[in-house]
Amino acid sequence: MENLSIWNKAYGDKNDIWQWDNCGIGAYIERLNDNLPVNKIVLEDSGKYAVIDAVLYNRDEIFDKLGEEITDTVSDEELLFTYIQKYGYKALLEVNGDFSGAVFDADNKTITLFRDHMGIRPLYYSCNESFLVFSTDIRGIIAVPEVDCSISENWIYRTTRGMVISDMVSTEYQNISCVRPGSFLTFSFSKNEMTKTEHVYWSVGKKKIRLSSDEAYQKKLRELIEDSIKRRLDAVSGIVGAELSGGLDSGVISILINRFGRECKYYSWSQSPEELEYAKDDERLVINDICQQEHIECHYGELDMKEKAKIYGITKETGIKIDIEELPHIRYALPAFINSLKVTQTSEDLSRLGAKVVFTGHGGDEGVSHRPNPYEMFHYHEFYHYFRYMFSTTNGFNNRIGRTLKKCWKNLTVERDSLKNHYSSPIKADGVLKDSFESSYKTDCREMLFAYDPIEYVRNGGSRNRLDNIALLGAYSKMRYIVPYLDYRVIDYAVSIPRYQYLRGRKNRYIFREAFKDIMPDSLYRVRYKLENSHRNVKPDPDWFEEFKKEKNAVVDKLDRTRWAKYLDFDAIDSWKEKSEPTGENISKDNFFMVALLNLAAAQNVIDKVRAVK
């Protein structure tokens, strides 16, 4: 319990731990709404004991169901526990919130772990025949000596081959898993064994939605998104923060927060135009248009990210010795997440500006604003709308029918094959695996579901790629990330309507653009792809290769050759480390090679650093 406590203390200021002869539960809780107290942390009722992390967005509806059984001043955690006690875990279907929790039934010798619909709040666990440990922070589990922290061979293979795509439950570690979003797990204990039973209470896109007109679809989508943002603003007190990236998703959220009258600090990862001049198609031009229209100010980040005081300070409390010159994923005990430095900078800077939550547009393009390939309509059997759309793309050309048929043929053969064949990320380290391991561990890449099947993409864990990251790094800045597009009602509606609503009149992301057209500046309405074009004006560092060599050495030296001997060809790695300065496209390939190795080193580093803490 002490080891778990060390690695969960960043998640809240109020804490409590209860222990019995052979088990214990505990939690660190933060308060996002100053009007709601945190009366109890370990909750108790009728022989059941619970620890819950929750922010609820439909408190009123839950109170109405409970009647007079509870007062309206209790915390979200107490309210959710009472609700579960009365209606059971399957009733979580009707709870709108970000939550995870555990309930220990002392009489029946069971522990039930549960999680919100889309997995906004993390919950990891590890178990064997007689032992169970669970934690919001994966490092808490790694800190427990009884847990086998072997790195997953599947993860090693996929990481080096550019095949890493998040699923719903697996992690970098063979024996540590996530509780599946929209589910609850019950572990039953007896003298001789422990059994596990999983129940799924919600799955996205199970029913099709059909309305009478384009306007009806747009109105419903807008109502749901506005309601999602409003509920989340009402659930927290004080100043809020919001990402403002120049894209459709964050732009709409920022505009709506401002029009709801809430004090908000807006933030972009990009560097200030005062420090870096505008480039062609610069995302900051869109940000500037939004700010002028709404009379708001955007705060900008830095190209050279400085040391972050809070993550440094809290990490220091664990007893880890920090070498400030090391790469961040090796300096701290940080899992191999994407965009870690940018997420850290955003949450740190907004925290210093007085915000305690940050609204992010994450999840929008996974199903809500959504940028599909035309093949999606064919995939979902909307054949009439598919051919109608393809015909519209040849407007103004001679021989339209012939051109349309040719475009359809190309889309249904070449483009379809590229979507449904194996997708490989450029972040990979070709030739780094030992032949003996690679030949015995063949596994298939996934299809590019993102572009043509949003329902399966979400069901396969596509939204998870940043959720675990923002939960961890936000906690280190005393910052909670709010994800309104992943309100289960919003995304369930968006993926369940006809797919042609996203491609009409030669406009991609049609329904989303039209639903909010009246509040968007023209530059935002016309955005096709959100790219950080401002970085085109960054002057290259003439000494970049010297710094790159230091980074290569740091990553390779971190890898424990004995631990990785079964999997990695260190002759190939050493040969790469000694390569001369690359040119052209080889610069990117070498950088991606290093990132893939850094992900391996980070997985090892988490174990090494966490288990060094006493």
Image (spheres, rainbow, N blue to C red):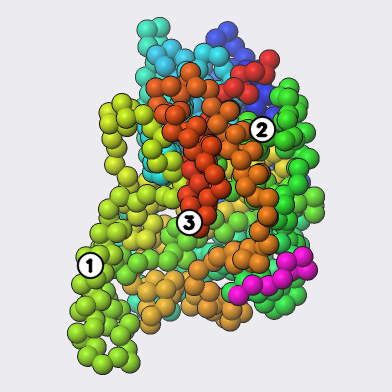
Mark 2 surroundings: few (<14), some (14-19) or many (≥20) residues within 10 A: many
| Residue bounds of the magenta highlight | 273-280
> Which numbered circle lies on residue 332?
2
Identified at 34% across, 51% down, the residue is 423
In this view, 87 is above or below 517? above
Q: Which type of secondary structure does the marked residue at label 3 adopt?
A: helix
In this view, 579 is above or below 436? below
Q: Which type of secondary structure does the marked residue at label 2 adopt?
A: loop
Residue on which the image places disc 1? 412
Q: Which of marks 2 and 3 is in front?
A: 3
> Which numbered circle lies on residue 189?
none
Q: How far separated are the C-alphas under marks 2 and 1?
A: 47 Å
User: Image check: 306 left or right of 547?
Assistant: right
**Is the stretch drawn in magenta largely helix, strand or loop?**
loop
Identified at 59% across, 25% down, the residue is 140
Is there any visible trace of residue 13 in the rendered image?
no
Magenta segment: does it hold 261?
no
Q: Which amino acid does label 1 sit on?
A: Leu
Q: How far separated are the C-alphas under marks 3 and 1?
A: 31 Å
- Residue 469 rendering spot, x and y as whole percentages: 57, 43
- Residue 563 rendering spot, x and y as whole percentages: 48, 20
Mark 1 surroundings: few (<14), some (14-19) or many (≥20) residues within 10 A: some
